[in-house]
Amino acid sequence: MNVENGVHDAHYFVPAPSKWPLVGSISLFCLALGAAFWMNSVAAGPYILALGFAILLWMLFGWFGDVIRESVHGDYGKQVDYSFRWGMSWFIFSEVMFFSAFFGALFYMRVLSVPELGFGVGYHAETHGLLWPMFNEAWPMASGPKVDAYEAMSAWGIPAINTALLLTSGATLTWAHWGLIENKRGKLKLGLAATVLLGAIFLCLQAYEYHHAWGELGLKLSSGAYGATFYMLTGFHGMHVLVGAIMLTTMLVRVLRGHFDQHHHFGFEAAAWYWHFVDVVWLILFVFVYCV
Amino acid sequence: MSTTANPTIDLGAGHHDHAHDHDHDHHTLTGWRRWVYATNHKDIGTLYLWFSFAMFITGGLMALGIRAELFTPGLQFWQPEFFNQLTTLHGVIMVFGAIMPAFTGLANWMLPLMLGAPDMAFARMNNWSFWLLPPAALLLIISLFVPGGAAAGGWTLYPPLSLQFGMGMDLAIFAIHLLGISSIMGSINIITTILNMRAPGMTLMKMPMFAWTALITNYLLVAVAPVLAGAVTMLLTDRHFGTHFFKAVGGGDPVLFQHIFWFFGHPEVYIMALPAFGVVSQIIPTFARKPLFGYHSMVYATASIAILSFMVWAHHMFSVGMPATAQLFFMFMTMLIAVPTGVKVFNWIATMWQGSMSFETPMLFAVGFVCLFTVGGFSGLVLSIAPVDTQMHDTYYVVAHFHYVLVAGALFSLFGAVYYWLPKWTGNMYSERAGKFHFWWSMVWFNVTFFPMHFLGLAGMPRRIPDYPLQFTDFNAIASVGAFCFGLGQLFFLYNVIHTIRGGVGKAPANPWDSPTLEWEVPSPAPHHTWETPPDEALVKKGLAAQALE
């Protein structure tokens, strides 16, 4: 523990009163209310939702702008740096747990509920026999008794390419980090730009894959246990790639403006940690959603 | 700033404000801006505590609506649909709106003071954690007025019922999302504050038990709040986007929701109980005038409870259909939790043993907590037995059990905490007579309300029903009378607090209880800014020595 080793800032930086938390709360309230209205066909829904997004963007620019200004101004001491490291680590832990819920659902349906409905395991034989005797389970091609026919997504097309892209992006990002540590700004810029580019290509391919799956394979959110877990896991992962790519783009802009040096670049590192986390989630996803 | 030779000067803000005027002028706003733009942990703690009290009254009024309906058999006041909305919102509001924010508020107020930190680690995010709560509460209140009314499937939101409601359920889902974001940010903040902001000399194994329980509680929260968010997101997509997570027609299973929900839900139980243990572990040594007995075993017991809490969730689902091996596993794991909990109760009693005890209001609530929480723990042990639970599942026995641990447990510890720290917060003493009256009034009527529910449950009365057979009348009538009297007593609590804030009883000294923890080293009321430079190590060690930790 760093504080036990005597790392105490003489004056731990406590920010001045700020309007951004309140703005963020108003934004999330609008997003929640707007989404609930929209889903229930209340006419105002989309507008409230759009307003929420607009306020959210304003808040993100304002709040992170403040943080960057404080950082550049040198307000953050060693102890604040440790706080950021702890904070980011626990945030990523919470993200791991969020994905765990969906992976848990996948494993549960794959191992328990779909087989029980499909051919009646143990004392669930009656479930199969009485409810859906005609349902023959075949993951991933038939994952629910009353589901329109669909085709599953093959692992060895776009998904395999995407795996290679994300793994490469992890390497380019580390290469950029080395550049930062060695104070080679060109290497840093090049590596970071390559990473963002690879992330963007990943997202484009993912969008194409969805188009292909939805339109040509008939694979939809409603396509049984497989369709639900496929779209929710890859969808939430894709959203995280998008967020990670935005974070890295922000870092690229900051690098181009001359921010960060060899010793002070936690903003960069946090984005990198996040990117590697998203990378690892993809690997697990590739194995359990696409391959197995 | 160099460490002053005389630690008694190096205490509050008065000294530092002169030295750093330029730094902190902008830190104090007046009027409404002070509260909505706050970055001060004391202001935000105060916001949390008042918000949770408002929610406590709101959820309490809903409980009284339930008890009024159940006073006699037949339908008196509400249609069953609205009765179900009352039970659902009562649960959601009390859990997420009252108990959890109250403990977060306490952590906000007290952790920086107890650990010798200038503020929470992330002071600005701290305010966002709080200000997400009122919008979430607003969504829940709005949901009462949309077509179809509020969510009415119980706070557990089980499908398939929760897939069938109207917009009220969506608003509840989004409210839970906001509450979850608030919880995650709040818990990351508390964990980081504890890990990174302690005073020199205060190693992990020397910090106050309240800090330990806050650390472990918020570890649990950051682990399971995202899981709940995942569960309600799946509900949402099942409701509106055609997924089949909880629908057997598409290969899903309603029981899957129960598994995910209770993977969150059981640690959640300890999220509401562990900080109560921490509060009581601060109060009892103070009024027994002895160091906490078995500090290390307290820490390990808290950690054991937290780890075990991830492995017991299916004891909420014994009657749903599960292989016998799974039932046995979850039954034994649940029983195992009684061991570290027993260690804690033993340690509290051993702390009091041969102590020089006095019974001011905080101590009364703490001792009341130990007695009644133990009752709730024992009824929990009864419920953990799978074949017994098959009979008791979803009966009033369960209702009695969890109100013993949540009202006489979590809530009583919160009352104790408020009386214990009010002198530090307000600079004024409360009325001891009034406090004691509040305690005894609450103690009596709590038991009148909830003890008969054990009998109702054993006799087979199901929970969440607006009407019941005649043979349950007497105990229900008693419980309803008790509930209204208990509720009335809480208005007296509000009066007590306001009376104290206004200084009706007189000024409080810096350390009215002669307690050795760091929060008592700053003046009363605690200045707006405290410990802007870390406290002197000698001062920290003096307190630790008095707690037998040095």
Image: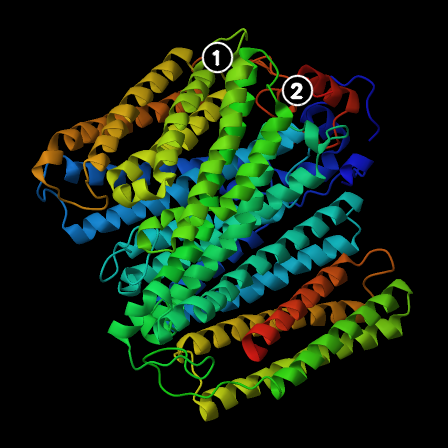
User: Residue B60 placed where, x, y %?
Assistant: 30, 37
Q: Do tags 2 and 1 sit on the same chain? A: yes
Residue type at mark 1: give it: Gly
Question: Which-is-in-front pick, marks 2 and 1?
Answer: 2
Name the mark on residue A263. Answer: none
Q: Residue furthest bottom?
A: A216
Considering depth in this image, is B503 or A91 the residue closer to the camera? Answer: A91
Say which residue appears at 37% left-offset and 76% top-offset: A118
Decide: is B264 above or below A168: above
Identify the element where label 1 is drawn: loop
User: Residue B389 placed where, x, y %?
Assistant: 31, 42
Residue receiving disc 1: B506
Residue type at mark 2: give it: Glu
Tell me the quarter of the picture where residue A200 sits: bottom right
**Relative to residue B10, is residue A126 drawn left or right?**
left
Name the mark on residue B521. Answer: 2
Q: How is the image coloured?
A: rainbow
Decide: is B464 above or below B401: below
Nearer-N-terminus badge (2/1): 1
Decide: is A44 above or below B339: below
Considering depth in this image, is B154 or B194 the residue closer to the camera? Answer: B154
User: Residue A30 placed where, x, y %?
Assistant: 43, 62
Identify the element where label 2 is drawn: helix
Say which residue appears at 86% left-offset and 67% top-offset: A178
Image quarter (top left, top right, bottom left or bottom right) of the N terminus of chain B = top right
